[in-house]
Image (cartoon, helix red, strand yellow):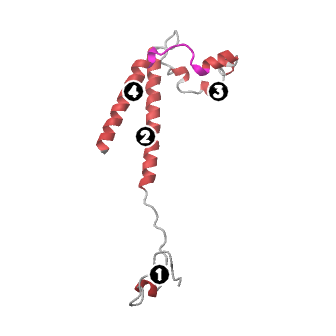
Amino acid sequence: MVKKVGTFTLLALAVSLALAVLVSPFASSRPDGLERVAEDGGFADRADGAALWRASPVRDYAVPGLSGDTGESKLAVAAAGLLGTLGVFLAALAAARLIRSRRRAPARAAPRPEVSASEAAGPPDGQAPAPPGRGDAP
């Protein structure tokens, strides 16, 4: 079973990486939903100079340094797709391993209640044992 899960995971990762590298360069250059709302709302220009965007490793879905003189190249977009897919896969793998390790951790045994010698010996001869949960009630 574990081998099948590993094989499926590697196959799914390979397909995802292939799609990210081969298809992402052909994605639409038109603004996505959030950019369109920002443009329609008139506040898109406020995000252009934000420090968060300047520090982003994959700004505008393209790896900096791989873009040509005319803007983003297909190689820069493919590299961004590859990095994004690998990042999501590694984050999911780390989360799965963390969850699995917590499930496998041995549960601590509850302290055993102390039993007196007379209780350990059982009921006196000729008497039936008390039903569970009834204790020493008459």
Q: Nearer the viewer, residue 9 or 64?
A: 9
Of mark 2 and mark 3, the one earlier in the sequence is: 3
Q: Residue at x 48, y 68 (%)?
A: 110
Between the C-alphas of marks 2 and 3, the distance is 30 Å
What percent of the width, then of the height, locates residue 106?
42, 60
- Label 2: element kind: helix
Q: Residues within 10 Å of mark 4 (few under 14, many from 20)?
A: many
- Label 3: element kind: helix
What percent of the width, then of the height, locates residue 123?
42, 86
Q: Quadrant of residue 31?
A: top right
Q: Which residue is mark 4?
A: 17
- Bounds of the magenta segment: 24-34
Q: Residue at x 47, y 74 (%)?
A: 112
Q: Nearer the viewer, residue 25 or 37?
A: 37
Q: Which disc number belongs to residue 93?
A: 2
- Label 4: element kind: helix
The reply to whether the magenta stretch includes residue 98 is no
- Label 1: element kind: loop
Q: Which residue is mark 1?
A: 115
Q: Which residue is mark 3?
A: 51
The reply to whether dot 4 and dot 1 touch (C-beta < 8 Å) is no
Between the C-alphas of marks 3 and 1, the distance is 67 Å
Of mark 2 and mark 4, the one earlier in the sequence is: 4
Give, as a three-letter code, the residue at label 1: Val
Give, as a three-letter code, the residue at label 3: Ala
Q: Quarter of the image for the N terminus: give it.
A: top left
Between the C-alphas of marks 4 and 1, the distance is 62 Å
